[in-house]
Amino acid sequence: MKSLIYITLLWLLLPGMAVAQSTQEFFSGSERFFAAHVADGKVDYKGINADPSALNALLDQARDIKVNTSDEDTYRAFWINTYNLVVIKGIIDNYPINSPLDKAGFFDKTKYAVGGEKITLNDIENKKLRAVFNDARVHFVLVCGAQGCPPLISQAYTPANVDSLLEQQTKLAVNNPNFIKVKGKKVGVSEIFKWYKEDFVTKDQTLVGFLNKYRTTPIADGAKISYYSYDWRLNAQ
């Protein structure tokens, strides 16, 4: 009887154990990949193109991994890493390329088999993350393959570090004088803040108010905001 109970419990637990193992392998593999191919926010596309086996293996793993919002940290970490890996995959599939925009439909037409679905990069950003979490910090960790993006980091997002890295990368971005260009009461900001205005500006918060939550030197109230042109050149080493 005891052995029957044990077998029954094991049968019930095995799917969850398999999912946990596959996500852990995915995070570990992503950590190795980003460490090997990213430095100072730039990606070694030439090296990846010469040997894409590690990238392809990671996306093969991501194809069948299904994460649930009930485990918020695992869910966020999985989709952030997957987005960044899929951007790299899209570039390698069209390599050599000078900009992700050189490929029509790069963000909104090309579909990838990840997370048990076939979805686009825009689907990951807008449906898997923005629609689920009211967290504007996500814009500073999803890296679109261009120099105008906040930089890609040389490590993976994991359930243990995802929240601290979201905070870290947001602070780095809004304190970067090349990203937030302050001259007295004139402030130039990335077009990210225009494209996703509703994520940063609410009835209770201005854009300056959002930025000042993370800036070490606050922007003056009443500052005049302008948007500088996005740099779509490839973020290549």
Image: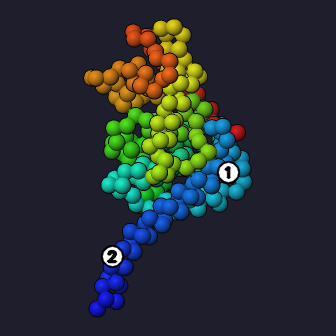
Q: Position of residue 83 (x, y in %)?
A: 49, 47
Quadrant of residue 40 in the image? top right
The answer to whether residue 153 shows anywhere in this view is yes
Tell me what residue is drawn at x 37 percent, y 51 percent. Answer: 72
Residue designated by label 2: 12
Disc 2 is placed on an element classified as: helix
Q: Amino acid at mark 1?
A: Ala
Q: Compare marks 2 and 1 and give the one earlier in the sequence.
A: 2
Q: Nearer the viewer, residue 69 or 100?
A: 69
In the figure, residue 183 lies in which quadrant? top right
Q: Is residue 123 above or below residue 204?
A: below
Q: Where's the N terminus, which quadrant?
A: bottom left
Q: Which numbered dot is residue 156?
A: none
- Figure check: 154 above or below 28: above
What separation in Å lies between label 2 and label 1 (alpha carbons)?
A: 38 Å
Q: Is residue 159 left or right of residue 84?
A: left
Name the residue at 34% across, 42% down.
Answer: 133
**Closer-to-camera residue (80/236):** 80
Q: Nearer the viewer, mark 2 or mark 1?
A: 2
Mark 1 residue element: helix
Label 1 belongs to which residue? 36
Q: Quadrant of the C terminus?
A: top right
Q: Residues within 10 Å of mark 1 (few under 14, many from 20)?
A: some
